[in-house]
Amino acid sequence: MPELPEVEVVRRGLEAHVTGRPVARVEVFHPRAIRRHVPGAVDFAARIAGSTLVAARRRGKYLWIDLSTGEAVLAHLGMSGQMLVQPPGAPDEKHLRVRVAFADDGPELRFVDQRTFGGLSVEETVAVDGTVLPVPVAHIARDPMDPHFSLDAAVAALRRKKTEVKRALLDQTVVSGIGNIYADEALWRARLHWARPTDKLTKPKAAEVLTEATTVMADALRAGGTSFDALYVNINGQSGYFDRSLNAYGQEGEPCPRCGRPIRREPFMNRSSFTCPRCQPHPAGFSR
DNA sequence: CAACCGCCCTGGGTGC
DNA sequence: TGCACCCAGGGCGGTT
């Protein structure tokens, strides 16, 4: 389940292994993988072939590669997307969706995605607030790893919302990069229940939960950032952090690391939220 | 306009 | 053993 830290690991791998290289050929094996590229597979391939990959960039969970043409290959990994760097001739993966072969005959870039929630597209770019972004990313807020990220701006955006705090944390126009896992971890660290109304959070409390989200993602990046080698750019949906250090997410019935009460699981937007019943009590009037 | 809901998709896991 | 069902997840389009 790639969230910001996992996507950043992939970005670093792409930066190291495919930037600066001239593309010879692009093959699309599944139309759904490029469904966001409206002109279709032939156009998708033609826009990339012959160009050189210039840089690998990221905002939140979006990842893109700048092309020498001025356009960008935009990628979202969804929940099962992988970017692999494989030698030409290596057996095709079962869920191989797109292959990018290079004119230098070096390793190929492969987009592999079992569940096809992810996908690729070629996009024009636009400058927003001094940063050049693919058009579909233009409306996404800066993420906490962004050098220009403003905590004050994120606090204000969060408190402007009239909704539950977890919904706001997952809203990529408030702050980007936070998914279900890191939202639950940040809320646990800040001792906030997910249903607390954003417009009643004090500024310090809003800043605390956002700061905790930043910290937990930085910890995860440190733990996961060492897990790829030269031929395996992807993190396989897992990081060392994911296995080891979660305090709340997925820990139903396990003792809260702070107080020992069993972590509870509650339905949230057709999925789950994990909280400590003592550290993260229900807000007044909560019923569900 | 902002909030919110349902849907997209697949395979691993579970219960009968 | 096999089958039906549940569940995971982010983003987007449609509705309220």
Image: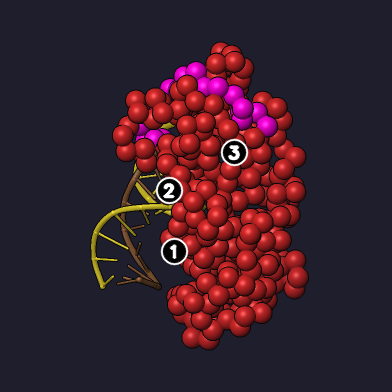
Chain colours: A red, B brown, C yellow
**Residue picked out by circle 2:** A135
Give the amino acid type for the residue marked by disc 2 in the picture: Val
Q: Position of residue A8 (x, y in %)?
A: 63, 45
Dot 3 or dot 2: first in sequence order is 3
Give the amino acid type for the residue marked by disc 3 in the picture: Ala
Residue A89 included in the magenta stretch of the image: no
Q: Position of residue A63 (x, y in %)?
A: 54, 43
Q: Position of residue A89 (x, y in %)?
A: 56, 13
**Dot 1, crowdedness within 10 Å: few (<14), some or many (≥20)?**
few
**Dot 3, crowdedness within 10 Å: few (<14), some or many (≥20)?**
many
Residue drawn where x is 31% and y is 34% of the image: A39
Q: Chain of mark 2?
A: A
Q: Chain of mark 1?
A: A
Give the amino acid type for the residue marked by disc 1 in the picture: Met
Q: In the picture provided, is A112 more to the left or to the right than A229?
A: left
Residue A17 included in the magenta stretch of the image: yes
**Residue picked out by circle 1:** A269
User: Mark 3: which secondary structure?
Assistant: strand
Q: Chain of mark 3?
A: A
**Residue picked out by circle 3:** A56
Gap in angstroms between the C-alphas marked 3 and 2: 16 Å
Gap in angstroms between the C-alphas marked 3 and 1: 33 Å
Q: Nearer the viewer, residue A201 or A247?
A: A201
Work out whether A219 lies above or below A30.
Answer: below
Dot 3 or dot 1: first in sequence order is 3
Work out whether A206 lies above or below A68.
Answer: below
Q: Position of residue A116 (x, y in %)?
A: 43, 39
Pick the quarter of the image with the C terminus of chain A.
Answer: bottom left
* Highlighted magenta segment, given as a residue range: A16-34
Residues at marks 3 and 1 touching, judged by CB atoms closer than 8 Å: no
